[in-house]
Image: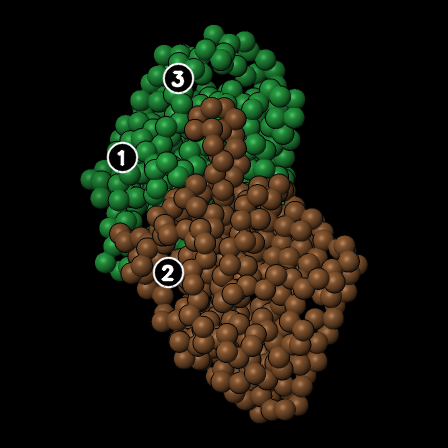
Chain colours: A brown, B green
Amino acid sequence: MPEESKKKILKPLKNFPLEEHIASGHRACQGCAEVLAVRHVLKAIGPEMVLAMATGCMEIISSPYPLTSWNVPWIHVAFENAAAVGSGVEAGLKALRRKGRVPDKEVTVVAMGGDGGTSDIGFQALSGMFERGHKMIYVCVDNEAYMNTGIQRSSSTPFGASTTTSPAGKMSPSGQNTSKKDMPGIAAAHNIPYVATACPSYYSDLMKKVAKAKEADGPAYLHILSVCPTGWRIPPEKAIEYGQLAVDTGIFPLYEVDHGVWKMSRKPKQLKPVADYLKGQGRYRHLDETLIAVIQKGVDEKWERLLKMTEMTGPATSEQPAQEE
Amino acid sequence: MGKKVGIEVSIAAAEAVGLCDVDVVAAYPITPQTHIVEHLSELVANGRLDAEFVPVESEHSAMSVCCGSAAAGARTFTSTAAQGLALMAEIVYIAASMRLPILMLVANRALSAPLSIWNDHSDAMMVRDSGWIQIFCENGQDVYDHIFHAYRVGEDPRVSLPVMVNMDGFILTHVIEPVEFWTKEMVGSYLPRFRPLNTLHPDKVVTMGAFGMPEIYAEQKMAHDQALKNSMPVLLEGWDELAKLTGRKYEPVELYRTEGAETLLLAMGSLCETASLAVDQMREAGRKVGLVKLRLWRPFPLAEVRKALSGAKDLVVLDRSISVGAANAPVTSEISAAMYHEPQRPRIHCMIAGIGGRDVTPEDITNMVDLSLKGTEQECHIYGVRG
């Protein structure tokens, strides 16, 4: 993105839904991009939905009994089972609708969890939901660690991030020494109709993808990078900027897999160096040039692989994907 | 009145679930529960039951699907045993605390290790504090009738709780018994449609499963405890109506030849039938022995238990599970606590019997009575154990 465009005041999108489905006054940290992602997901789906949520940040900030932030039907059961609870809601509503016991209208069932609730403890339930073909959307809001319990590493924590259970130290110079689990790739391997990555820093792309997921003829998976100023140790006002940098450096590429066809959503002519993204994040403060080079190499390889996937699976995509404001 | 057929109890139970017109069945296969869910999936596949059969990837997801389904207002069924119940235990507690009426048929089986597919009650005892209504069945007819009873009571807005119907693995699940079927009309007159107070639907927005701060947690738990205890009149009402319909009268605590008994046996589940044979034999031999059958385990029928037991000199509790390291086995502990403050109470003897599928014959039960009467109070024996 050109430097000057950062300074532009963004105009709201045409037809941007003004209705709020998660009320303000929730207890999210300052600068939480995760709750912003949730807000945009709900706006794109609209009120005709049921949301099943895993235990985690979004659950705990929104539902201290007897208060609630939710203006849509919402259920929380446990940590690892949002996909299964959502499956039950979908199956229940389907049977009741067929039998004429609920109004005959489309209700979008959404299950949502954090990266721990999705890629670790909820992994099996999620795979089951995909495989059984429930017509619903699963949204992973990925802030790259167990932030709710105090910044412990998950399998979605990237290589090189220092967390409270993967701290950088003399014997562990990188902090997290494993690479981020490829959840979108795993979701796509289930051959479900729609998989996409998104980031609220690119909210119109995010909302378009939610709308596509809503129309999918089976399970859809959205993996949303959700910048966490508290856990990433960045100033709250930088959350949107770091989301943009994650996309523009290619460490978190935006793409979709629509019925097996891989397509880049943003393909900058030149990726920014990943060091631009790592700089200023407390979780990466310990990294030296060698480790940054390791991360850069990983980003480059993944980017190349993604491009190959788009070439292998899709029509010739020489055209630049539409750039948003 | 429906017709009486000889049928495997698992199949009869599945037929009863089908007659209830359930909306969602979510289950994962585990011995000895399999015949129940196999038959249900057949009913769905053949179009005899209009339901969503959700073949989940684990029991944990089975109970989670059930929570979502019941919260959406759908009549919901699952069935499991032993390790399956252990795996779903986390959600078993949540289903009850969220007041979601679900019917779960537990084909009681021993918990690992060592791995055992055979019967005992350790699985049900593991979740005894979860806040479900828990009923133990003596025979096939009993299981069949309680499918209807469980839905009627659990879904009643005065109750709104999940119900666990326990049937002994293999001893009941895999035997062919005479079962008198219900007609559709009988079910229609006995079991109203499920109309929960709140459901997950955009037409009426609700939040379910909010978290409890310390200022509210204890009150929530008290409300759950009261709700479970307050289900008693609805359970009794359900059994009264069932008696009018079928002529079969079930009660929380049932008595067999207890008149003038100095020694009482207390049992649960299919062991009651074996124990009744032993009582017959002992009565024929002139011994004053009777049997108390504990059908309702939760809510615990405190008044009924006290009334049934206070007159006896000795009570032999046949416990089909072990609480490792505890003073007593689970049922004995509960009964002891119930009787402690009674001015007149029997000496209570704990006999752990039939765990992990070990056979218990009427002769064994007579032996247990003899052993108990020779022994002193507060001894806990594992009957017939070697070494």
Give above or below for A193 relative to B295.
below
Q: Residue at x 55, y 37 (%)?
A: B26
The subunit letter for the residue under badge 2 reads A
Q: Nearer the viewer, residue B337 or B210?
A: B210
Q: What element does badge 3 sit on? A: helix
Compared across the picture, whether B358 is left or right of B1 comes to right
Q: Which residue is mark 1?
A: B230
Identify the amino acid type marked 2.
Ile
Compared across the picture, whether B200 is left or right of A25 comes to right
Give above or below for B282 relative to B183.
below
Quarter occupied by residue B297: top left
- Disc assigned to residue B297: none
Q: Position of residue B164 (x, y in %)?
A: 45, 36
Q: Position of residue B70 (x, y in %)?
A: 44, 36
Identify the amino acid type marked 1.
Asn
Q: Which residue is mark 3?
A: B190
Q: Residue at x 70, y 80 (%)?
A: A297
Compared across the picture, whether A218 is left or right of A19 comes to right
Asked whether residue A133 appears in the rendered view, the answer is yes
Q: Residue at x 67, y 76 (%)?
A: A270
Identify the amino acid type marked 3.
Tyr
Q: Confirm whether circles 2 and 1 share one chain.
A: no
Q: Residue furthest left?
A: B343
Q: Position of residue B104 (x, y in %)?
A: 49, 35
| Distance between mark 2 and mark 1 Cα atoms | 32 Å
Counting labels gives 3
Give above or below for B38 relative to A203.
above
Q: Confirm whether circles 3 and 2 share one chain.
A: no
- Disc assigned to residue A60: 2
Give above or below for A145 relative to B37.
below
Asked whether residue B89 appears in the rendered view, the answer is no
Quarter occupied by residue B325: bottom left
